[in-house]
Image (cartoon, rainbow, N blue to C red):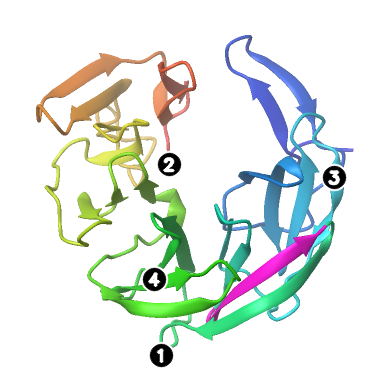
Amino acid sequence: ESNSLKIYKFNYETNTVETISDILPNAYSSLPITIFNSTYGEEIFLAYSGKLQVYNTNTLKHKYNLTPTESNTIHDFLYTSSGFWVFTDSNNMYVYQRTDDNLTLIDKKPHFTDFQSSYNYTIFEIENNQLLVGHKNEANSILYNLNANGILSEVKTVPVSISENGKSNTYYNAIDNFIINFDEKQLFSTKTFSDLASFSQPNFAIGISMNGKNIYGSNNNPSWSVNDDGLQKKEAIIYNRTTQQIQTFTTKGYPHVIFENYKGQVVSISSGMKRE
C-alpha cells in the first residue's frame, strides 16, 4: 500500500521519519493539518468531507472522526481557549461541546449576508474570548464575543481582510496582537482593528516569529516556471518590523517553509526542487 497520501511525523533535526499514519485520508482537504491541545490531550485534526479525522500525535494512529451535525461542509474550525469547538461554513458559525467522538451543538449564528461560492470563510480566536470571521472576497471581517456558556453575539464589522488561502496566508499573533495578511503585505491591529505598517519585503512571506517582530519569506514567486533560470534563488529573507532592516541568508535549497521553532531557532525547510 502506498504511503504517499498518509501523514508523516518527520524529525528535521535527525532527518528521519519517526512514524506514519495508519490510514489514508479519505479525501483531499484545502485546510492545513492542525494540532490542538484540549481536555483530550494533544491531537492532530484533518478536515475532509464535512468531518474531522482525529489522530494521536505520538503514534499517528487514527482515533475516530468528529462530525459537526449541523453542516455538510467545514470551511474552518478551531478549539477555543475556553474549551469550545467552533466551525464555519458558507452561511453560519457553529459552537459545539465535545464528549469523546461526539459533538453537541451549543449555538449557531449566521455570518455574512452575501453568499460567496468560492474560497473558505476563516475563523481566528483573538484576545478576550473574541472570534473573527472573514473571507477573501469580503473587505471587512465580523467580530463576535463567545461567552462562558458558548453563546455567540456579534459585536461589529471591522476593516480586516483575509487572504485567498485563509490560514495558509493569514496569521494571528497573540503576543503582539495583530493579524497579518501575507498576500497584501499588510498587518492589522486586533486591539483597534486599524492598519499597521505594511512591508515590501520579503515579496512572498511564509511565516512570522513567535514574538511577531520578524517576518520570514523569500523573493521566489510560486507562479514562476521552474524553467525560469536565474529568477528563483536559494535565499531566505527576514524583515525586522522594529528596525525595518532586511537580512538575507543563503539556504541549502529553495526555501518552502520558514519558521521559528520551540528552541528559538529559525528553520528553513528547503528543497533542491524549485517551488511551482
Q: Nearer the viewer, residue 215 or 92?
A: 92
Prevalent SS, magenta region: strand
What is the quadrant of residue 65 in the picture?
bottom right
- Name above or below for residue 204 compared with residue 266: below
Report, in whole angstroms, how far the alpha carbon at label 3 lies from the one at label 1.
Answer: 37 Å
Q: Which residue is mark 3?
A: 62
Residue 167 in the image, given as x and y percentages of width and height: 45, 53
The amino acid marked with disc number 3 is His
The amino acid marked with disc number 4 is His
Look at the image and give the residue range highlighted in magenta. Answer: 90-99
Badge 1: few (under 14), some or many (20 or more) residues near its Cα, within 10 Å?
A: few
Q: Earlier in the sequence, mark 2 or mark 4?
A: 4
The amino acid marked with disc number 2 is Glu
Residue 137 in the image, given as x and y percentages of width and height: 33, 74
Report, in whole angstroms, how far the alpha carbon at label 3 lies from the one at label 2.
Answer: 32 Å
Q: Is residue 91 visible?
A: no
Q: Which residue is mark 2?
A: 276
Q: Quadrant of the C terminus?
A: top left
Report, in whole angstroms, how far the alpha carbon at label 4 lies from the one at label 1.
Answer: 12 Å
Q: Earlier in the sequence, mark 3 or mark 1?
A: 3
Determine whether label 3 and label 4 are within 8 Å by CB. no
Report, in whole angstroms, how far the alpha carbon at label 1 lies from the one at label 2.
Answer: 36 Å
Answer left or right for 193 relative to 211. Answer: left
